[in-house]
Amino acid sequence: APLMNYAVMPEATASASGESSSGSITVADRARDGNTDGNWRHGSVARMGLEVNGWWELDLGQVKEISHLHIWNRTDCCGDQLAPYYVFVSDQPFQSKDLSATRDQSGVSEYYFTSSPSPTQRVEVHDAGRYVRIQLAGANYLNLAEVEVFGETVGPANGLTFMAYEGAWEAMPDFDAIHTTRTGTTKGFDLSV
């Protein structure tokens, strides 16, 4: 079955320690915008301030079967700041932002990394989860270019947004300049093969 990045789905929400906003996009959302560009100046890196055990968290909106994660690091500088760190996955909300309490929480899967992603780290999960947290183990700046949460799409899929266009093109058209024939949100659209 095809893999889907749950982090970019509309029902997913991100939050982070020391978060501020920039217009309508929160800093935390930059790490789930579908853009793995690690250059902070390009506007897609979630960067939190200097903190002890700073964290970034994702709520997928519902429990999903998670295959693996990809954690993308900042690449223009400061890549070594994302180490050491933990990745936590749970089907229940995290009860605390405290690192020790999260490690001790029942039902939380824990993955520990002593070196920073260069530029990416794959984390094998193969378990159900709704909540994903990246948390530093120490004092530093937390920089994340992207966090991808992959799982298989099986059965009915609800809430996928689509746009349909008519016609045939010899080259990729400018979709902003042509009119859609149908838009909507799927309900019970079966993606299984």
Image (cartoon, rainbow, N blue to C red):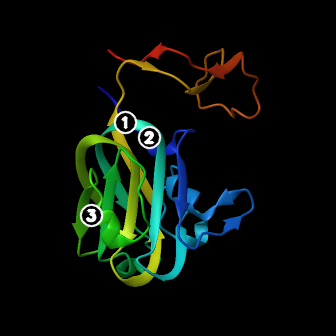
Quadrant in which the N terminus appears: top left
Question: In this picture, is 68 found above or below 110?
Answer: above
Question: In this picture, is 56 found above or below 162?
Answer: below
Q: Dividing the picture into quarters, in which one does residue 5 lie?
A: top left
Percent x, y of residue 92: 38, 46
Label 3 CA crowd tier, 10 Å (few <14, some 14–19, many 20+): few
Closer to us: mark 2 or mark 3?
A: 3
The answer to whether one can see residue 77 in this image is no
Q: Nearer the viewer, residue 70 or 173?
A: 70
Q: Which amino acid lies under the numbered mark 3 shown in the image of this protein?
A: Asp
Question: In this picture, is 146 found above or below 20?
Answer: above
Residue at label 2? 6
Give the mark nearer the N terminus: 2 vs 1.
2
Percent x, y of residue 64: 37, 36
The answer to whether one can see residue 109 in this image is yes
Q: Which amino acid lies under the numbered mark 1 shown in the image of this protein?
A: Lys
Give the mark nearer the N terminus: 2 vs 3.
2
Label 2 CA crowd tier, 10 Å (few <14, some 14–19, many 20+): many
Q: Nearer the viewer, residue 96 or 51?
A: 96
Q: Residue at 27% across / 54% down in the picture?
A: 106
Secondary structure type for disc 3: helix
Percent x, y of residue 151: 33, 37
Residue at label 3? 104
Secondary structure type for disc 1: strand
Estimate the spatial distance between the alpha carbons at disc 1 and disc 3, rounded to whole Å.
22 Å
Closer to us: mark 2 or mark 1?
A: 1
Q: Is residue 17 left or right of residue 148?
A: right
Quadrant in which the C terminus appears: top left
Q: Residue at 48% across / 82% down in the picture?
A: 51
Which disc is residue 64 wearing? Answer: 1
Q: Is residue 175 left or right of residue 71?
A: right
